[in-house]
Image (cartoon, grey):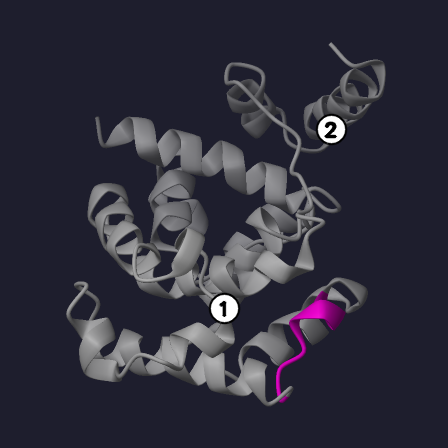
Amino acid sequence: MNMKREKTLNKIYRHFEERDPVLFSVLSGMPLELLQKEKKTDIYFSKLCREIISQQLGGKAAAAIVGRFSALFPGERATPENVLGFSEHALRNVGMSWAKARSVRDLAAKSAARELNLQMIPALGDEAAIAELMKVKGIGRWTAEMFLIFTLGREDVFSFGDLGLRKGLAAIYGKRKIATPRSIARITMAWAPYRSYGSLAVWHVADNAQK
């Protein structure tokens, strides 16, 4: 194991062991990888397209639609310019909803016009980055938060609107302890500055509860 990676993982484990022993027991029993920041800003656009397409879909359904969408473009790489070459109807034909087709085209239009500058997103703080991404129709806070965690590799993000997190929290702490947003905030604030890793543990519990 890379020494730097091992040192960072140990730091995260110690943090949860001290702040939240209940969640630490979950983390210590699951495979945990460090979040990685995508350094190639030119693929942010295609990543966001995938996030939009995958909204409220299961993994297999989302993957199938993303695959058909990607196949529309040379090298299976979506860019603002080549997305704008397809109508909403053509995008709808790969399986996405009308709302998602409009959202993908709005993302393309705003990116092409530099109304949304994806290259500057990494330099922004979490809230500023979320606000910037939400300029696009169909990108809400949840989609922006997923982008922060899984593309920008931000370590301290918790999505209050994620149903999987609510289910996992209920399984770990009991429904009464997460009855309100304030009670959820009280639990998750203890995880800072590693709330994204806490989220990975909660998703792990939620995913396994469904099997």
Q: Nearer the viewer, residue 57 or 22?
A: 57
Question: Which badge, 1 or 2, is on the more N-terminal residue?
Answer: 2
Disc 2 marks which amino acid?
Ile
Quadrant where the C terminus sits is top left
Q: Is residue 114 magenta?
A: no
Residue 198 picture location, percent across and down: 58, 38
Which marked residue is nearer to the observer: mark 1 or mark 2? Answer: 1
Query: For the residues marked 1 and 2, what is the alpha-carbon distance in whole angstroms?
Result: 37 Å
Q: Is residue 207 left or right of residue 137?
A: left
Disc 1 marks which amino acid?
Thr
Q: Residue at x 42, y 38 (%)?
A: 203
Q: CB of mark 1 within 8 Å of CB of mark 2?
A: no
Q: Is residue 211 above or below residue 51?
A: above
Q: Residue at x 53, y 18 (%)?
A: 31
Residue 74 picture location, percent across and down: 41, 58
Q: Secondary structure at mark 1?
A: loop
Quadrant where the N terminus sits is top right
Residue 201 picture location, percent across and down: 51, 32
Label annotation for residue 79: 1
Q: Is residue 116 magenta?
A: yes
> For the residue carrying disc 2, how many other residues have a C-alpha within 10 Å: few (<14), some (14-19), or many (20+)?
some
Q: Which residues are magenta?
A: 115-121
Q: Residue at x 29, y 74 (%)?
A: 100
Of all residues shown, which one is farthest toward the top?
A: 1
Q: Is residue 150 above or below residue 142?
A: above
Image quadrant in which you'd find residue 27: top right
| Residue 11 visible in rendering | yes
Q: Is residue 34 left or right of residue 164?
A: right
Q: Is residue 113 above or below residue 5?
A: below
Mark 2, residue position: 12
